[in-house]
Amino acid sequence: MSAPEPLDTLHGHAADNLRFIRDAMSKAAHFTAIPGWGGVVMGVSAIVTALLTSRVADPVRWTAWWMLDAGVAIAVACFAIAEKARRLNLPLLARPLKRFALAYVPPLLAGAILTAVFVANGLATRLPGVWLLLYGVAIAVAGTLSVPVVQTMGIVFMALGAASFAAPARYGNGFMAAGFGGLHIIFGLIIARKHGG
């Protein structure tokens, strides 16, 4: 039995090393397809919703309007992420996106569960604090896997959510406009300018 050719052994080691490096880079990579312009569109949609709901007295109808806006925001975010990833030639199903989603989604699911509980118990007027706080948690935690400004955005959302709980419930719609509207526009513009759209 002959010994393996030195060149074949060298190529095998090189291929193994490349696989190891690719895997390590994939694990360490940050999710950079955060959509700045998509955030701006989401912010504008939230401001429109805040204006439409400013005179809605029924908390259940008010909640329904904001849930509709959340659906619009999810659609905009998915489209904007896919478009930015395509433009920057980033694979959508790569490990960074999966890790980002695993950090981002659980606080949002908790928010959805608490929404049902708050509405069922007549506490819908306190939902702005829940939504802003838990959305902030989602962004802050997932932001550790993205560009630093994303984590900052999450922390500001959390602070606004805490302030909403401290304020009278009648200011909830204003907090929604300031957070989901104003903060999305401000941070969306920063991300678009500094991180490729």
Image (spheres, rainbow, N blue to C red):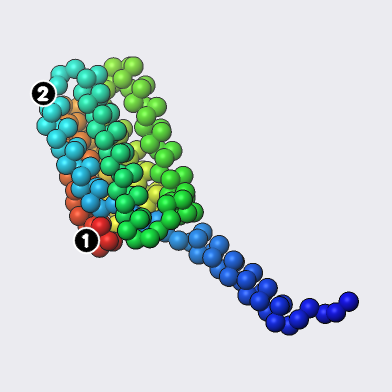
Give neighbour class at mark 2: few <14, some 14-19, many 20+ (Cα, 10 Å).
few
Q: Check the picture and name the quadrant holding the C terminus.
A: bottom left
Count of number-bearing discs = 2
Residue at point 37%, 52% (across, down): 143
Q: Going by the image, does 83 lie left or right of 96?
A: left
Q: Amino acid at mark 1?
A: Arg
Q: Amino acid at mark 2?
A: Arg
User: To which residue does mark 1 refer?
Assistant: 193
In x, y percent, where is residue 111? 36, 32
User: To which residue does mark 2 refer?
Assistant: 55
For the question of whether residue 132 can be seen, the reply is no
In x, y percent, where is residue 181? 19, 41
Q: Earlier in the sequence, mark 1 or mark 2?
A: 2
Residue toward you, 87 or 163: 87
| Residue 29, picture quadrant | bottom left
Q: Going by the image, does 125 lie left or right of 32?
A: left
Is residue 103 placed above or below 90 in the rendered structure?
A: above
Residue at point 25%, 63% (across, down): 194
Q: Check the picture and name the quadrant holding the N terminus.
A: bottom right
In x, y percent, where is residue 151? 33, 53
Asked if labels 2 and 1 touch by Cβ distance under 8 angstroms, the answer is: no
Residue at point 22%, 61% (across, down): 193
For the question of whether residue 139 can be seen, the reply is yes
